[in-house]
Image: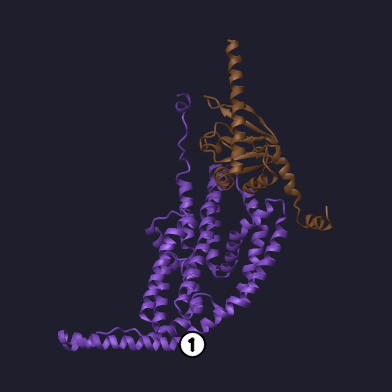
Amino acid sequence: MKENRIWQNTLYLLAFFVFIAFVGLTWSVLIPFLLGLVIAYLVDPLIDLFVARGWRRDRVVLVLFFFILSFGAVLIFYFFPHLYKEVDFAIKQIPTYANSIDSLINEINSELRQRLTRFIGHRADQISISFHADKFFENLLVKLPANLLNVAHMGVWVLIIPFSCFFGLKDGQQWIDILFELTPSRYVESLLGLLEEINATLGGYIRGLLFESACVGILTMIGLFALGLDGAVLLGVITGLLNFVPFLAVIVGGLISVLAGYFQHIPNAYLMGIIFLFLGIRLVDDFVLIPFILGHSVSLHPLVMVFAVLAGMKLGGFLGLVFAIPAAAVVKVILTILFLERRLDDPITNQDVIS
Amino acid sequence: MSLMTQFFRRIFRNDHHWQSVVFFRNVPIFHGLKSRQIGRIIQATQKRTYRAGEVLFEEGQIGKAVFIIESGRVELTRKNLDGTPRRLGLVGPGQILGEMALLEQMERTATAKMLEDGVVYLLYSATLEALFTQQPAIGVKLLRNMAVMLSALLRRTNQELDKLGQAQ
């Protein structure tokens, strides 16, 4: 009996490792499917509103998809051309920006050498800032598509993501039902607890983060547009996307915007305006958006957050960066349930009732 | 009913959902809730088929979920001091088990085991609490129903204690 159990556990462990190896090997293929399922998970509460009123899930999903596709079409026709124009403009401006940065660095280098020669003589010739913006941008433009989203895969992704999202919405509950049917009865309550806790922690966080990022992006867009900066839409989109990674939106978004302003030769007062705009957005984010939208859905220590972000970047590139915090939150929920499962609430004791 | 309404009802109506609403409405803890509110509760539950002999929960485990029996019979037992099980009673369709988990996460005081194949809805206590925050009207009715149930249970216990006292 005991031997059987050991064999059974070994088999489960082996199956688990085979599964992990399979996921590792097919990771790049799995990404669009997973993204589709993540979108399905985010949209599901909307479907649930109708299902709770006695509507058929499959029909509601079909109608919703019709609306999403229509909205997508409107977005493609009205918003994307504007964004494309700005991206095109930014790419055309890159050589000019690169030359300006290079000449600025050359000026700094010669100034630096002049001053250092007084102290260390001819050895000052060896000291210089060895940054070449033209090479940097060239490298970035060559590597970006491969790093961020492989352009060759984009076409397949555009098809797979909605496909996976549709079936996730339509059949997701059935998949969960099957998981519960297959789980031994003694673990059913724990599994339910685990899934519900993960859902409570993650659902609110990811939906809140999306909304918060959209707010940050739109505020940036409006602010930069008001300051008369070209490419406000593109910079807003970049800042909104950067907001998925903790601490990055204001620092990098702000830096890019200030540089863009500098190269567009806008007055110094407006450059200060950009800095104040980003500081203002940070304050609004910290004191209004985060407390009201995200609340305390993910209470991770800042050190854990930074570690998670760096580890996510190392493991999964840009997507790893985006999913680092939610993944860390899931690990936290699992550990809490595993190790604090036997923690009891503070009950009202008999003494409280009698006295 | 207009032709248009009939058409939409035919396309969108989920008959299975409305059967579940009827079932839930007859469970004492959900008395007085509107169809839409019951719909939200059904959304928060997880359905599972249990085979005869499978254990729903064990005495001493921390209770985190409520079990609503749709079909099948469940036997409740409690261990005597010498470890032998003592049958406390049988629970059947439309009845609820482990409702104390809604109020406090305490150790289960009995073991529940399926006597025959049946379908059970599980409702996680924290999920229900979250629903109470979103829809306080559901919380008020549900907690009132629970208070009534507990009061009835206390009354019955008092009556049985009286009977025991008189017998002695």
Q: Which quarter of the picture shows residue B94?
A: top right
Q: Which quarter of the picture shows residue B30?
A: top right
Display colour for chain B: brown
Q: Which quarter of the picture shows residue A120?
A: bottom left
Picture layout, residue A197 above or below residue A78: above
Q: Residue at x 42, y 55 (%)?
A: A300
Display colour for chain A: purple
Near-viewer residue (A290 or B54): A290
The percent coordinates of residue A314 (x first, y second) are: 43, 68
Report whether B4 appears left or right of B116. right
Q: Which residue is mark 1?
A: A92
Check disc 1 and give the amino acid type: Lys
Picture layout, residue A127 above or below residue A316: below
The percent coordinates of residue A252 (x first, y second) are: 41, 72
Near-viewer residue (A340 or B131): B131
The percent coordinates of residue B45 (x first, y second) are: 63, 46
